[in-house]
Image (cartoon, grey):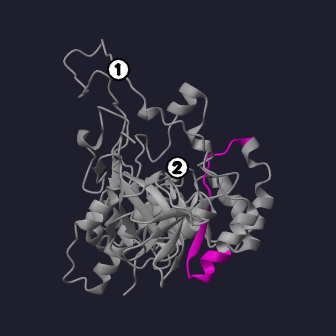
């Protein structure tokens, strides 16, 4: 059985490695130019080369974004950059602009090209158009239903694949083609510099349309009329697979290591359960509960089951729901002493109730009964960022296991 690809974002090398550790089949990332996340750390060419080698050693793929909507000056240096990516051996590049597409075809004719969601592919004929030009994957616009996707997947050539976003932040504009940021702040979303003005507070006034009322909900802080809920399709994996989608894309190159590990782990484990026996598969709610332990907005299924209605928006706040803190990353573990070497990521206290999890296994809970610094000095609290600690574990752990604890506003 051909298995669906789990595609994860990476804003830097640490996140790339963590995403692969926690079950991603492929990574998409941006270089220092030509991509749509200008404010992520992003990758130098040397880092892309290291990331590609790391992924390929583990049987995974790496796709690099060239998906800005470029002005003339934005094309400076793109030829050499494309040649460098080709030499490194990236598995594909993502483009949205026909001019960028032609640059890739000219300077790396054997490079696989994926059409970014920024290109707004919403129908079969456009998918076939891009196939005729040489593209071999389409990242469909977010505005399609499953029924529309099925019509596309049933009628494209066998060597063409379809990728869709299944988790993460949603854009109130048409698959990211937005001018609000440029208009209000002077930062161009279509060239990778979105300021997310859709999350700002607004008050809507319309004097010339009596009798027409927009459903604006307001509290004492204002209203957020363009603020979308986060997409989450983990409960609907069967429908995504049935629709013929080849790659499930997680949004979030700006997200934390903790976010990536938690979300990717949940999707990986749910998918693995499905493929054990599709005929008896039933979604386990624990995977959704795990995802809710990272910072997130309320969830929506977007356009997959028809047009997104008003309940896909959050009108009362632009804040995230935060239930847990990422407090430590396991660097090493001694099975005899059960002592883990941990890099602190948020403050921990002796006696804290923590949860510990790793790839492809459930979390366990315990209290911190033993905590020292690197020199073996007993600690009551670990307050210093990235401090190296020794913590006794109730169960065996491994490198890259994550420690979290319930968020306490009073700390």
The x, y position of residue 36, in whole percent, is: 59, 49
Q: Is residue 394 left or right of residue 113?
A: left
Identify the residue position indicated by label 2 in the image.
383
Q: Is residue 61 left or right of residue 4?
A: right
Is 229 on the left-hand or right-hand side of 401?
Answer: left
Label 2: state its secondary structure. Answer: loop
Give the number of the disc on residue 338: none
Location of the C terminus by quadrant is: top left
Residue at screen point 33% across, 23% down = 221
Q: Is residue 70 magenta?
A: yes
Measured as percent of width and height from the top left, residue 357 is found at 39, 69
Foreground residue among 191 and 43: 43
Residue hosting label 1: 203
Q: CA distance from mark 2 to mark 1?
A: 41 Å
Q: Which residues are magenta?
A: 53-72
Residue at horizontal 32%, vertical 16%? 205
Q: Residue at x 33, y 31 (%)?
A: 225
List x then y, in percent, for residue 62.
60, 70
Of 317 and 193, which appears nearest the observer? Answer: 317
Along the line of sight, which residue is nearer the eye, 197 or 180? 197
Q: Would you identify the image quadrant in which residue 274 lies?
A: bottom left
User: Can see residue 368?
Assistant: yes
Residue drawn where x is 29% and y is 47% of the image: 298
Sequence order check, earlier mark of 2 and 1: 1
Furthest-top residue in this view: 207
In the picture, which quadrant includes the N terminus? bottom left
Specify few, some or many for label 2: CA neighbours under 10 Å numbering under 14, 14-19, or 20 or more: some
């Amino acid at each position: 059985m051909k298995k669906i690809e789990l595609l994860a974002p990476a804003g830097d090398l640490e996140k790339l490695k963590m995403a692969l550790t926690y079950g991603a089949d492929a990574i998409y990332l941006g270089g220092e130019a030509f991509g749509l996340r200008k404010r992520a750390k992003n990758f130098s060419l040397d880092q892309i080369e290291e990331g590609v080698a790391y992924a390929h050693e583990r049987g995974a793929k790496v796709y690099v974004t060239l998906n800005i909507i470029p002005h003339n000056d934005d094309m400076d240096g793109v030829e050499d950059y494309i040649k460098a990516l080709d030499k490194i051996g990236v598995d594909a590049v993502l483009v949205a602009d026909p001019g960028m597409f032609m640059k890739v075809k000219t300077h790396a004719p054997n490079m696989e090209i994926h059409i970014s969601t920024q290109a707004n592919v919403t129908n079969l004929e456009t998918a076939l158009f891009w196939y005729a030009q040489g593209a071999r994957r389409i990242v469909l616009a977010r505005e399609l239903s499953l029924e529309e996707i099925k019509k596309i997947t049933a009628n494209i050539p066998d060597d063409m694949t379809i990728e869709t976003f299944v988790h993460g932040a949603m854009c109130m504009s048409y698959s990211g083609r937005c001018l609000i940021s440029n208009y209000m702040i002077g930062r161009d979303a279509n060239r990778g510099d979105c300021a997310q003005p859709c999350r700002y507070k607004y008050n809507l006034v319309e004097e010339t349309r009596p009798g027409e009322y927009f459903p604006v909900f307001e509290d004492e802080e204002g209203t957020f009329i363009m603020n979308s809920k986060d997409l989450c399709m983990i409960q609907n994996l069967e429908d995504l697979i049935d629709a013929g989608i080849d790659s499930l894309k997680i949004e979030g190159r700006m997200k934390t290591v903790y976010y990536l590990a938690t979300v990717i782990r949940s999707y990986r484990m749910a998918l693995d359960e499905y493929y054990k026996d599709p005929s008896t598969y039933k979604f386990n709610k624990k995977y959704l509960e795990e995802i809710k332990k990272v910072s997130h907005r309320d969830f929506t299924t977007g356009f997959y089951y028809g047009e997104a209605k008003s309940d896909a928006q959050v009108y009362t706040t632009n804040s995230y729901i935060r239930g847990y803190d990422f407090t430590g990353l396991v660097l090493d573990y001694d099975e005899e002493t059960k002592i883990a070497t941990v890099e602190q990521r948020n403050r921990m206290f002796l006696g804290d109730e923590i949860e510990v999890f790793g790839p492809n296994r459930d979390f366990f809970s315990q209290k911190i009964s033993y905590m020292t610094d690197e020199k073996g000095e007993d600690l009551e609290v670990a307050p210093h960022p990235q401090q190296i600690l020794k913590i006794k574990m109730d169960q065996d752990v491994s490198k890259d296991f994550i420690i979290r604890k319930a968020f306490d506003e009073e700390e």
